[in-house]
């Protein structure tokens, strides 16, 4: 049996569980909860203790479901919610049969969503969360989520995305308390920090609502209204009959002017700028940035390793993070992100408007201007046809003096019928990129099936040789063909093994003229033990034109669910790009002295020479807003001299009021830059 035949047989074996007989759980439906309004004089005192008599009068939300098993969680959770003319109040009572096992670790605000992206399904600690779908759009990106851990550290994720400045992200409060039977939490969420429909013709309205708890000791994630492992947003609960106070919102203009002073080898440089955010209505926001400062923002570092396409690097600049979800188009398992904000490295003036025109209509418009050099336009519109269907259009344009005059536009739509979903994207491009004709087309069509522990996707993709997106990250063009993905995973509540995952990614592409392009498969398995070890094994066999990739990879980690005490190693060997390759990636993440976080990520690759990369970061957290941190990046590439960059910074930011940054070095330079910078941001 050849290596390739064995690999394809493994793909078939991994897909067998999808069609095997299994017990079908009872159909899930969303749960209703009647709204209870209280006068402002009855607002609870936020101390985390739940001793206020008010809470005894509020109907409880109980019977939280373990998302993995579909059964009631072993340790019960009780949530309550009420509101007055100023705010919404939420209470959680979390019982734990081993209260000494309740864990709180994070100290910095918004850490839960920053470290886990938009998915709060994993964590290094216990937490509780309340989610609001105020527009009843049943879209994950439209939801506002508020979470707190047993230390009282708050995390929020707003629909559309917001920057982390307190004046923009909203001043909400939380308090917690340890109890003999577990822990409890109280949240106060002012109406003015939420986005919600503004139509006054409706006296009372229904909101989407859910309560979620993560118990670190057991790794159980439980919900009041069970949306399932696939997170079907239409199954979110209902908060019925909410009478939104008429005076709860007033249009708000927030100004964040800054001053920045650089001192180094040359003359002292001073610059000024301002960011402004205007909340015109609870559902529509405008942001303007004049002469923004990106030099002091620590960009993500692109890791080394063989890749036939450009690697994606996450965005960290506040202007692009604010409302960023409203511009998100394209999928990583498809063509790639059609708008990749890192393409816009600098601008003089930028403006964006985003939000809801109606509860069913979402819009985002972005304009940037680098005077005399380039201008950029991005626009996206989405109409919700039903709780599980949507359609819209996207436009992306770059006009640069250097020669890029490129436009991309197209339509997208998706629908889901129970466990089966379908989505399609159709785009055309025009103009020129790097003085090359860019008139082309691209299409992605995907059908998927989600059922508990199974997820299967079959996608047909095509892109003409001349399809170009100057402001996007389109991984490949000049191809057509099929790609698939199947994932099967399982968790166990008892025994030595905690979880298991198997996945297969077959791919068969041809060039547009019919020549074979990319074909083969990538398969892998991941194990996690109850003692918090993980082991991953993957095998790849693919042909790219005349090259063959044949690799075996191994990843082992101790403390996989605890970033404060985690270390591991990844290894890959075989052939890539027609040459033998070996890769070794050590990693370490620890917390020392109670508040000092140290993270190391290394990469050593041998392929036609040696590549070596070492990234070490540290961060000492004095409080939720004051930190001292830094990063060292060392890179050695074949035929190039070694380069090392480092910087150290002090930051007093993340809260309300004036922010202070002091920086030695340049976070994003190739080599260390002998300079110091002081930045002040004033809130107005």
Image: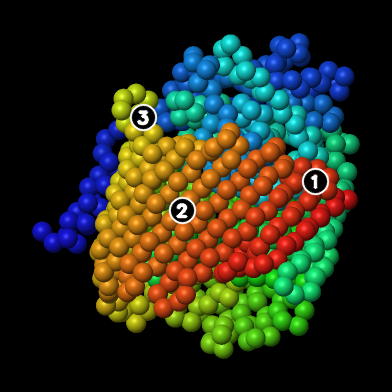
Name the N-terminal-most of marks 2 and 1: 1
The vertical placement of 652 against 631, above or below, is above
Q: Residue at x 74, y 26 (%)?
A: 89
Q: Is residue 648 visible?
A: yes
**Residue 657 shown left or right of residue 638 in the figure:** right
User: Which residue shows up at 72% across the image and 49% down it?
Assistant: 651
Q: Please identify, in this view, whether the residue under mark 3 or under mark 1 is nearer the observer.
A: 3
Total label count?
3
Classify mark 2: residues with Cα within 10 Å, few (<14), some (14-19) or many (20+). some
Quarter-of-image position of residue 391? bottom right
Badge 3 local density, few (<14 within 10 Å), some, or many (20+)?
A: some
Q: Position of residue 174 (x, y in %)?
A: 72, 29
- Whether 407 is drawn above or below 96: the answer is below
| Residue at the spot of label 2 | 601
Q: Element under label 3?
A: loop
Label placed on residue 530: 3
Residue in view at x 46 percent, y 18 percent: 74
* Separation of residues labelled 2 and 1 (CA atoms): 34 Å
Residue 99 image position (x, y, % from top left): 53, 16
Q: In the shown orientation, is residue 117 left or right of residue 19?
A: right
Q: Position of residue 660 (x, y in %)?
A: 78, 51
- Give the residue at mark 1: 167
Which numbered disc, 2 or 3, marks the residue closer to the eye? 2
* The image quarter in which residue 199 lies: top right
Q: Secondary structure at mark 2?
A: strand
Q: Quadrant of residue 676?
A: bottom right
């Amino acid at each position: 049996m050849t290596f390739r035949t064995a690999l394809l047989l493994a793909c078939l074996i991994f897909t067998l569980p999808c069609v095997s007989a299994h017990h079908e759980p009872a159909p899930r439906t969303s749960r209703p909860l009647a709204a209870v309004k209280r006068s402002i004089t009855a607002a609870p005192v936020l101390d985390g203790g739940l001793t206020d008599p008010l809470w005894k009068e509020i109907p409880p939300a109980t019977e939280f479901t373990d998302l993995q098993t579909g059964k009631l969680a072993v340790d019960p959770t009780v949530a309550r919610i009420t509101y007055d003319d100023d705010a919404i109040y939420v209470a959680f009572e979390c019982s734990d049969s081993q209260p000494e096992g309740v864990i709180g670790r994070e100290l910095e605000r918004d850490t839960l969503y920053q470290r886990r992206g938009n998915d709060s399904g994993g964590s290094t600690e216990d937490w509780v969360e309340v989610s609001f779908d105020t527009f009843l759009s049943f879209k994950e990106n439209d939801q506002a989520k508020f979470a707190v851990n047993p230390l009282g550290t708050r995390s929020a994720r707003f629909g559309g995305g917001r920057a982390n400045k307190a004046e923009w992200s909203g001043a909400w409060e939380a308090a917690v308390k340890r109890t003999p039977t577990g822990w409890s939490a109280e949240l106060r969420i002012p109406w003015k920090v939420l986005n919600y429909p503004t139509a006054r013709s409706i006296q009372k309205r229904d909101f989407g609502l859910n309560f979620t708890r993560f118990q670190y000791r057991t790794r159980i994630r439980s919900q009041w209204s069970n949306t399932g492992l696939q997170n079907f947003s239409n199954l979110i609960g209902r908060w019925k009959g909410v009478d939104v106070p008429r005076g709860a919102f007033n249009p708000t203009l927030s100004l964040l002017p800054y001053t920045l002073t650089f001192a180094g080898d040359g003359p002292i440089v001073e610059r000024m700028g301002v960011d402004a955010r205007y909340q015109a209505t609870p559902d529509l926001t405008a942001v303007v940035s004049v002469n923004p400062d990106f030099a002091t923002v620590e960009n993500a570092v692109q890791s080394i390793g063989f890749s036939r396409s450009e690697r994606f690097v996450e965005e960290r600049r506040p202007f692009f993070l604010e409302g960023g979800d409203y511009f998100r188009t394209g999928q990583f398992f498809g063509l790639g992100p059609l708008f990749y904000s890192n393409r816009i490295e600098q601008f003089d003036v930028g403006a964006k408007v985003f939000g809801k025109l109606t509860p069913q209509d979402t819009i985002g418009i972005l304009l940037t201007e680098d005077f005399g050099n380039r201008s950029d336009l991005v626009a996206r519109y989405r109409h919700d046809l039903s709780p599980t269907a949507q359609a819209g259009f996207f436009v992306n344009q770059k006009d640069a003096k250097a020669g890029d005059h490129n436009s991309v536009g197209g339509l997208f739509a998706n629908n889901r019928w129970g466990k089966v979903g379908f989505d399609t994207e159709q785009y055309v491009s025009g103009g020129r990129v790097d003085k090359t004709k860019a008139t082309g087309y691209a299409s992605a069509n995907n059908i998927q099936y989600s059922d508990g522990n199974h997820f299967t996707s079959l996608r047909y993709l095509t892109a003409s040789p001349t399809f170009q997106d100057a402001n996007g990250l389109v991984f490949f063009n000049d191809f057509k063909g099929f790609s698939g993905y199947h994932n099967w995973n399982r968790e166990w509540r008892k025994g030595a093994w905690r979880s298991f995952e198997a996945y297969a990614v077959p791919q068969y592409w041809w060039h547009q003229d019919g020549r074979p392009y990319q074909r083969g498969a990538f398969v892998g398995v991941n194990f996690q033990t109850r003692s918090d070890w993980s082991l991953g094994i993957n095998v790849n066999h693919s042909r790219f034109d005349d090259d063959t990739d044949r690799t075996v990879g191994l990843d082992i980690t101790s403390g996989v669910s605890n970033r404060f005490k985690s270390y591991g190693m990844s290894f890959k060997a075989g052939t890539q790009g027609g040459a033998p390759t070996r890769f070794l990636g050590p990693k370490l993440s620890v917390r020392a002295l109670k508040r000092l976080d140290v993270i190391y990520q290394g990469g050593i690759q041998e392929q036609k020479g040696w590549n070596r990369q070492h990234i070490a970061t540290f961060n000492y957290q004095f409080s939720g807003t004051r930190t001292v941190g830094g990063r060292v990046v060392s890179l050695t590439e074949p035929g190039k001299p070694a380069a090392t960059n480092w910087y150290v910074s002090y930051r007093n930011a993340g809260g309300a009021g004036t922010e202070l940054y002091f920086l030695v070095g340049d976070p994003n330079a190739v080599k260390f830059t002998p300079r110091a910078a002081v930045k002040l941001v004033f809130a107005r």
